[in-house]
Image (cartoon, rainbow, N blue to C red):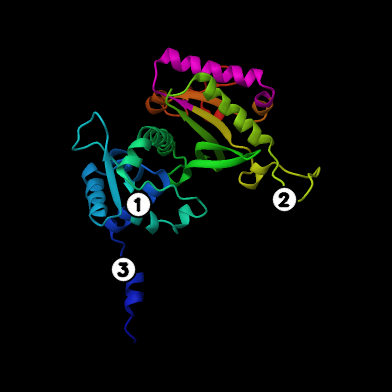
Amino acid sequence: MPRPTAKARDAHRPLNPAEVLSHQLITALAQHRIATTAQLRRMLRPDGTRQLISRALNKLRADGLVDYTVLPGSDRSRARAWYLTPDGARLTRDLPVLRGRPPYPITSTTAASLKTAHTLTVVRTHLAFAADARRLGHEHGPWDWTPEVSHAIGEGERVVADAVLYYTAVEGEQRRKLRAFVEVDRATMSGERLAVKLIEYARLHQYEAQPVGRRRTAASEPGWMRWYPVFPRLLFVLTGATRTRLEGRISDLQAMAAQHPLVAALARQVPLGAAVLEDLEQHGPTADVWTPLTGGEPRPWTDL
């Protein structure tokens, strides 16, 4: 009987858990841009220890694949936000889970520090959905949350969602697939500027992309149908201010949904909701914490 080749032996070799974790870490950083040690643990090894993640990250840093920036005003020995180096970004370029996505590499501590606050808040939002999904037996993992998704809306303009959420609610034999555009607001802009995002999504809902040189036809379909079977619901997640101020910003969103003709048309066909991030973290996104932008009592995001 011939002896197995080295390649064949490797194919049947048990996976090294450290190798698997390292691969997941660099993939997660490619997907989410920046994340803290604690966030990566909750994302990839919720039942694991911080030391497990730290060892793997430090090994990747020694290999020149990741680096970190220290969060301001925190314990300098612990609060690190990790990102890929140029070598790490090149290594992940052809990963299947990232195929088709434009690269947004962060190649220096300075660049990382400029993006840290917002990006980490977007990751916090994802983790709230992921924890709720695990609790309920639903499906939503690290690769079901795609940050910085851009779509054309005409006249050379684009709308960029902070993230697109993919989620499968499992109830017995039924599987309900849900998608959402997620906008994370840290109260760094005016309530009016935040509400204008609704107009951008309303334009996306109506936008029909036409090949150059061809006339518009009655059979033309909205451009978003190239990517989604139904238009994703739109979720605003707010944080960074007092409860009173955040409620005022939700009122601004409701006013835009009621008063702007394009947005009102969108609201008749697409679920629109807003919630406070801390409520998602404390109660879970499937609790009655979402305010419908068309009015009504708070409810789960799945019931908007």
**Frontmost residue, 244 versus 296:** 244
Quarter of the image with the N terminus in it? bottom left
Residue 128 rendering spot, x and y as whole percentages: 40, 33
Looking at the rendered structure, the kind of residue marked 1 is Ile
Q: Nearer the viewer, mark 2 or mark 3?
A: 2
Up-down: is 281 above or below 172?
above
State how far apart marks 1 and 2 are (Cα).
39 Å
- Residue under pointer 2: 212
Looking at the rendered structure, the kind of residue marked 3 is Arg
Quarter of the image with the C terminus in it? top right
Q: What element carries label 2?
A: loop
Q: Which of marks 1 and 2 is in front?
A: 2
Residue 242 rendering spot, x and y as whole percentages: 39, 15
State how far apart marks 3 and 1 are (Cα).
22 Å
Q: Is residue 159 rendered magenta in the image? A: no
Is residue 31 in view? Answer: yes
Question: Residue, x 63% and y 40% (percent of image)?
Answer: 156
- Residue under pointer 3: 13
Magenta stretch: dominant secondary structure: helix
**Frontmost residue, 156 versus 69:** 156
For the residue carrying disc 3, how many other residues have a C-alpha within 10 Å: few (<14), some (14-19), or many (20+)? few
Question: Residue, x 31% and y 83% (percent of image)?
Answer: 3
Quarter of the view holding residue 110 = top left
Is residue 176 rendered to the left or right of residue 131? right
Q: Is mark 1 on a helix, strand or loop?
A: helix
Q: What element carries label 3?
A: loop
Quarter of the view holding residue 295 = top right
State how far apart marks 2 and 3 are (Cα).
53 Å
- Residue under pointer 1: 26
Residue 71 rendering spot, x and y as whole percentages: 27, 34
The stretch of residues the image draws in magenta is 237-264
